[in-house]
Image (cartoon, coloured by chain):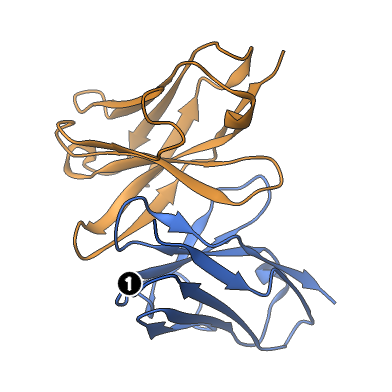
Chain colours: A orange, B blue
Amino acid sequence: ELQLVESGGGLVQPGGSLRLSCAASGFTFRSYEMNWVRQAPGKGLEWVAQISTSGSSRRYADAVKGRFTISRDNAKSSLSLQMNSLRVEDTAVYYCTRDEGAEGVNNWFDPWGQGTLVTVSS
Amino acid sequence: DIQMTQSPSSLSASVGDRVTITCRASQSINSYLNWYQHKAGKAPKVLIYTASSLQRGVPSRFSGSGSGTDFTLTISNLQPEDFATYYCQQGHSFPYTFGQGTKLEIK
């Protein structure tokens, strides 16, 4: 069974750091690009970051560029998101999701994890 | 960035109804449009990819159409489990962007 399980969320003060993790199982992790998508309270879905299969290519939303770093460990089937200089507006549920399709054609997200809540507040 | 605009933002319907949700892209995205269903506290789920392809396991009462800038998601014979929020997403180019969502509620 395909499964993505996020962890690492919690309460952090503005300016602080947090590291999210996502454990993947049920598929060949190293063969897929991976993404983080978030949903702020009462808001819609927002793509955050993507990493290539090897980890050599990373893309970010402008809102997090320079503050967040996506990484992966293919040996452990694990995805991470290091979040630094956190802001109140980063408060959201963060989802780990597998990238389907191919760049230049179409890309969609399936499956998704259950999400982990990050709250940035003083 | 490609802006995705969904309408309506909310919709009330009854079990057995047919509903249509529209999504417009700010520029042509070919057929690179995907639809998701999201229930509170659960993982989002892809319903339709590449505008009209039904994801495996998704009931056939869900269908999608469109190309270029205008797309629709149609749900026929609404079932109680279909009441949720629906999002479109363009998979054409970075940054991937979503519509603002359509909340489907029971009338």
Q: Is residue B59 left or right of residue B84?
A: left
Q: Quadrant of residue B54?
A: bottom left
Residue plotted at (61% across, 47% down): B42
Q: Is residue A81 visible?
A: no
Q: In the picture, residue A60 is in which quadrant?
A: top left
Taking the spot 72% from the left edge, 88% from the top edge, the residue there is: B17
Q: Quadrant of the C terminus of chain B?
A: bottom right
Residue B89 image position (x, y, % from top left): 44, 62
Chain ID at mark 1: B
Residue at horizontal 69 percent and vertical 40 percent from the top: A41
Give percent across and percent down for residue A65.
38, 30
Residue under pointer 1: B29
User: Label 1: how many residues lie within 10 Å, few (<14), some (14-19) or many (20+)?
Assistant: many
Residue B49, percent across and down? 37, 70
Q: Residue at x 71, y 46 (%)?
A: A42
- Is residue B74 shown left or right of residue A29? right
Report helix, strand or loop for mark 1: loop
| Quadrant in which the N terminus of chain B appears | bottom left
What residue type is disc 1 on?
Ile
Task: Using the image as rendered, state which of residue B82 and residue A64 is in the foreground.
Answer: A64
Q: Please, is residue A17 above or below residue A26 in the view?
A: above
Count of numbered marks: 1
Image coordinates of residue B91 in percent, x first then y, are: 33, 61
